[in-house]
Amino acid sequence: MPASRRSWIARTSTLALGAGAAGWSALLVLAAACRDDLGLAMVVQAEASATSAEQTSNFQVPPPPFSAGVFPCTDCHDPEIPVNTNRRELKTAHQEIQLRHDEEHRWCLDCHDAANRDMLHLAGGALVPFEESYRLCGQCHGDKYRDWRAGVHGRRTGHWDGEKSYLLCVHCHNSHAPAFQPIEPMPAPTPPRRTP
Amino acid sequence: MSHGCDAGATSGLSRRDFLCALAGCAAAAAGSCADPTHTPFFRDHLKELTPEDKARLLRELEQEFSARYGKPVEVALDSPRPGVEFAYALDISRCVGCRRCVHACVAENNQSRDPEIQWIRVLEMDKEKGVDFAHADPYYEADTVPRPGHFYVPVACQHCRNAPCVKTCPVGATWQEPDGIVVIDYDWCIGCRCCMAACPYGARHFNWGEPEIPAEQLNPKTHYLGNRPRPKGVVEKCTFCIQRVRAGLYPACVEVCPVGARKFGDLRDPDGEIRYILEHKRVFVLKSELATLPRFYYFFGV
Amino acid sequence: MRTLRAFAEFVLGSLRIVRRGNLLYWAWIAFLLALIVRGVLAYATQLEQGLVATSMRDQVSWAFYIGNFTFLVGVAAAAVLLVIPAYVYHWKPIKEVVVLGECLAISAIAMCGLFVTVDVGRPDRLWHLVPGLGRLNVPNSLLAWDVVVVNGYFVLNLLIATYLLFALYLRKKPDPRFFTPLVLLSIPWAIGIHTVTAFLYNGLAARPFWNSAILAPRFLASAFCSGPAVLLVVMQLLRRFTRFEIQDAAIWKVAELMAYAMGVNLFLLGAEVFKEYYSSTEHLAHMQYMFTGLAGHAPIVPYMWTAVGCSLVAFLLFLVPRTRRSPLTLNLGCFLIWAGVYIEKGMGLIIPGLTPDTLGEIYEYFPSRNELWVSAGIFSIGFLLFTLMVKVATPILLGEFQASVRAEQSGTEASLKPT
């Protein structure tokens, strides 16, 4: 390849990269500033995946226990429509959800992503799919997340001598009201009776 | 049916052969020889049986149980895995006293329904008193659990490293296997109940009557030292679901616990749950002053 | 050979003796046989249903049968209370009646064996205990040791009694080279059987009521104070109904020794009571169950206080020479001491040891009707054995039942010295 062609390629590539990076950052700033659904979700997600390296999922979990018909959320939530991010009591949908999960300080959009309704988001903004919701829970409940990774928190099934099988947090805990409610016990043992 | 009276042992005259010859196997013992519902009357201790003897023993039991319950029953005698040492951990900050472990155990391990035998006993205790057996109640009834002001401590065999029951058995019918499980040979036990007097945890249970299990509820995958149907007049207890754990599975109680309070694994596995619990949680054992050194740890997960 | 024939004649002669008796004798035999039959029927029920026919359950897994066993091991050990003065101190008044003690020991051990047999869940597997056939877990298992020493004691006493009676039947003196060591051996062996039985209980750390170092001394003291009571009564009966001359001194000496043993027994009981009530730990619960009831459960409290009362009164009756020597109070004392120790050692040891159980549960055990019938049957077997043995021994000791002259003239072994 002649030297002039090589230098042309080098110059053009550098320019393109620089422009791309600048445009990208601008978009990020814009997205962060407006929190508007501008179809940037895919972009942001790719970024998020790259930065949260240690969370790559090697936890095989069953599918998230969605209620019937509720997923994907975008079936109802049109990405084009701006989201009202003000905290309020929901009147037209999802009223049956009783939030009892630090509701003094948190509400729906602290976990559910406003821009991409089919995803959750971490405190830093990174998106996580529902299949990896443990990463979100683990942000606040770090000690339980560590225990869960070791197989010590949560119901243990499968093989003690092989790959551990995991459940999502939400398979046992209702994400909106995670505390376990009292359950009905099974019958008591029969007290011994004397033979006459 | 060919009974163990044929002198098939190539290593010389076994005790059984000698006795059979002496007793005139064809005569008085002919009844039990020909009767497939009884194991051979004169047999040696399990640890002295040859592999062929053991295979025959298992086959005879399988025939007996399959006939009795009307479905194919399997009786295995899986050996312990070398290098494995089982241990158990129970999170009493999480147990809610729902008793699902008790009933899962009964179903998995073919315990008699009438008379009722339950290997696990869930004790309800007072939060103000702490772990206090003198005021514990296994017969609590409630609409829902946990009941306010109470916590729950399930107790079953602790598979002690220094087991008083093993020490006291006069015929060596109970012993600790290399993988840590304390087992009972139900066909060797004479039912003297010394072990029950010796056990500090009330973990051993006796077949006071003929055990009854409805055939449709019988678990047909059994282990000779574990959940095979037991005869009247012998002692039984938790075996860590030996039929499951030696196949790599978790015990039934671990799998069924809805709050994940029960943990089980290989003590020697550095990545296992038990080592993690010993490292990161504070464990205690019941009645530690008796120096039984249980393999069953209790801890507080939260 | 000649000795064998003489022995055969001895046996046949004994059988003839036990068939002779007055109305009272036959009424007693009939009564015992009736109870035995009833006991066998009850045991058949138990074999069929399983031990659920008793009132034992997981929470109280040893009870009436084992309580009786424990008491009777003590009775068997107490035969030595006659042996010591006779053979160690060469006190003649007792020497003649030592064999009665051995007969009692044999009957008691037979009953012990029967109580264990009816208590185990699988009597068809008892052969597992025989070393060589099965597997006997010595040295670890105290019950295995108990099997060894108790059976050994049985054989020892059987040997001594048979040898002595057969020798007297042949008008020979027992060869001291053979006989005396056996008799002297029975002393530590008697202590041994009851110590091993005590160790069976006090080695169990799971049962704090039993896990006490003074359990073995208590067992021995209570055995020595109660076992000979039967012998005292029998000796008086023999004196009254046969030509047997038993000196008062013998009877009073035995009663005196029993008094001292009861004193030790009461002292040890007091020591236990102090320890439990003063330290007042959780382990007090067992003693409370015995003496005051626990959490509203008090089924054995009246029995325990009865036992204490009987023991105290008997102690005083035997201690005070005047009451010891008066037949009425002596026999009352015998009855009270037997009753007191029977209750205290049988029910008063086993039940409180297991109540509350290891997980704090209280199950109110009380023997079932079936258990009582089986036990009555076993006691009847023991009493029958003892009756028959005494029936044969008495004429031998009196010189009324002896080998025919022909047997003697045809020569006997050189080792037996002629009288």
Image (tube, rainbow, N blue to C red):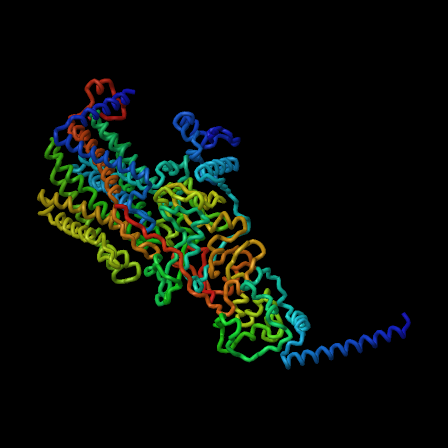
Question: Does the rendering let one see residue C77?
Answer: no
Give whichever of B210, B295 is nearer the camera: B210
Q: Position of residue A124 (x, y in %)?
A: 61, 75
Quick check: C189 above or below B276?
A: above
Give whichever of A41, C142 is nearer the camera: A41
Q: In the picture provided, is B87 more to the left or to the right than C203?
A: right
Give the residue drawn at x 63%, y 73%. A79
Q: Residue furthest front?
A: A92
Quick check: B253 above or below C69?
A: below
Q: Residue furthest bottom?
A: A33
Q: Position of residue B227 (x, y in %)?
A: 45, 46
Q: In the picture provided, is C122 more to the left or to the right than C300?
A: right
Q: How many numbered tags mark residues here?
A: 0
Quick check: B242 above or below A100?
A: above
Q: In which quadrant of the rendered view does residue B148 lie?
A: bottom left
Q: Residue furthest right?
A: A2
**Quadrant of the snapshot with the N terminus of chain C:** top left
Quick check: B169 above or below B4?
A: below
**Quadrant of the snapshot with the C terminus of chain C:** top left
Question: Does the rendering let one see residue C187?
Answer: yes
Q: Position of residue C20 (x, y in %)?
A: 16, 26
Q: In which quadrant of the rendered view does residue C162 lie?
A: top left
Q: In which quadrant of the rendered view does residue C93 lie?
A: top left
Give the residue drawn at x 24%, y 40%. C373
Give whichever of C85, B169 is nearer the camera: B169
Q: Position of residue C175 (x, y in %)?
A: 25, 30
Give whichever of A72, C260 is nearer the camera: A72
